[in-house]
Image (tube, rainbow, N blue to C red):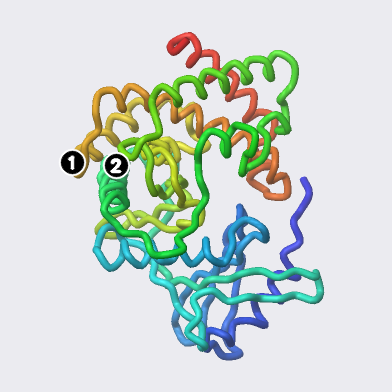
Amino acid sequence: MIAFDFAPFDRMVATALPRWGMGPAARAQVINHSENITYRVDDGEGGRWILRLHRPGYHSDAAIASELAWLEALRGAGVVRTAAVRPGRDEALVQTLRSEEIGETRRAVMFHFLDGTEPEAADIGGSMAQLGEVTARLHAHARRWVRPTGFERLHWDFDHMLGARPIWGDWRAAPGVEGEVKALLERLAGRLEQRLARFGSGAERRGLIHADLRAANLLVGGPEVAVIDFDDCGIGWYLYDYATTMTFVEDAPEVPEWTAAWVDGYRRAGVLSAEEEAELSTFLLLRRMMAVAWVGSHGETELAQSLGAAFTLGTSGMAERYLRRMG
């Protein structure tokens, strides 16, 4: 396993902390590395914060500003428990950091720290109904919210997911995609494209979504499940938000039970038709294929390295079962 060298980024962040008014006692420690590098910051005065160091080339300045605008609108409307943004001393929400050591420029955003813990896979079922309800409220807000001028976010359509312009890379480049497995996954991708085309892409089907409601972006233990990290939010199928709750555990035996709880919760605050419910497995497989692509294009992360070819093999088993049921 190849270890990622965080040291230059640690120094970049340490040098930048005074931009948020922090003194020499402030300390930052890496807590996650996925699309971005995330730090927990202790300001030396009892305050705790979360700093997100953006992956270069993933979002423009306008896209980051658009994410933060939706986040603030959600907080202001009391739709979901999520983190507020801490501006820098210059009042800018997004700071630009530069490391001459590695020759990179990175955008950084500081968030207030929220109490709570990431749910374990074994415990996520207890939060599914609540998460379904929160997701319905997110979707209701997205449908009525007037986006600010210049709003810019990713578009999660088939072309940008598994098609010709995949945001997370070509799934065919992932470990273990070869021979019969590759042929099976090609069949699956084609069938998913057909079903999604039939399902439709109108305003009732697609809109602004979180797009990454996996366990790593949830906090439990408070009065309500908290949702964090809107970095992947964009325009996509609303039902894709369901599928993201099962990320990396899509083949767990508890998925039917978790799904039923999520559906019950969603219907407390929103409408979910029988037709939409019947298509949830399509979105589950779509997300799983997206995760395969992510593993292939993020080999520098410990998570991708730990999943490897075994994750692709597990996906092929899911593909066989789906194709038997859905054609």
**Where does the image place residue 320, in percent across and percent down from the top left?**
54, 13
Task: Choose top left, top right, bottom left or bottom right for residue 303.
Answer: top right
**Where does the image place residue 91, in percent across and percent down from the top left?**
47, 84
**Where does the image place residue 256, in percent across and percent down from the top left?**
35, 25
Mark 1 vs mark 2, CA separation in Å: 8 Å
Q: Is residue 249 left or right of residue 223?
A: right
Q: Residues within 10 Å of mark 1 (few under 14, many from 20)?
A: some
Mark 2 highlights which residue?
A: 132
Mark 1 or 2 closer to N-term? 2
Amino acid found under the numbered disc labelled 1: Arg
| Residue occupying the point 57% across, 30% down | 289
| Residue occupying the point 61% across, 44% down | 167
| Residue occupying the point 64% across, 23% down | 313
Q: Where's the N terminus, which quadrant?
A: top right
| Residue occupying the point 52% across, 61% down | 63
Amino acid found under the numbered disc labelled 2: Gly
Helix, strand or loop for disc 1: helix
**Where does the image place residue 40, in percent across and percent down from the top left?**
54, 69
Q: Residues within 10 Å of mark 2 (few under 14, many from 20)?
A: many
Which one is nearer the viewer's eye here, 61 or 5? 61
Helix, strand or loop for disc 2: helix
Which one is nearer the viewer's eye here, 130 or 207? 207
The label on residue 227 is none
Mark 1 highlights which residue?
A: 268
Q: Is residue 156 left or right of residue 277?
A: right
Looking at this rendering, what residue extends furthest in the front direction? 149
Residue 38 vertical placement versus 87 (above, below): above
Q: Are the residues at dot 1 and dot 2 in contact (C-beta closer than 8 Å)?
A: yes
Residue 23 vertical placement versus 321 (above, below): below
Residue 6 vertical placement versus 191 (above, below): below
Which one is nearer the viewer's eye here, 140 or 316? 140
Total count of labels: 2
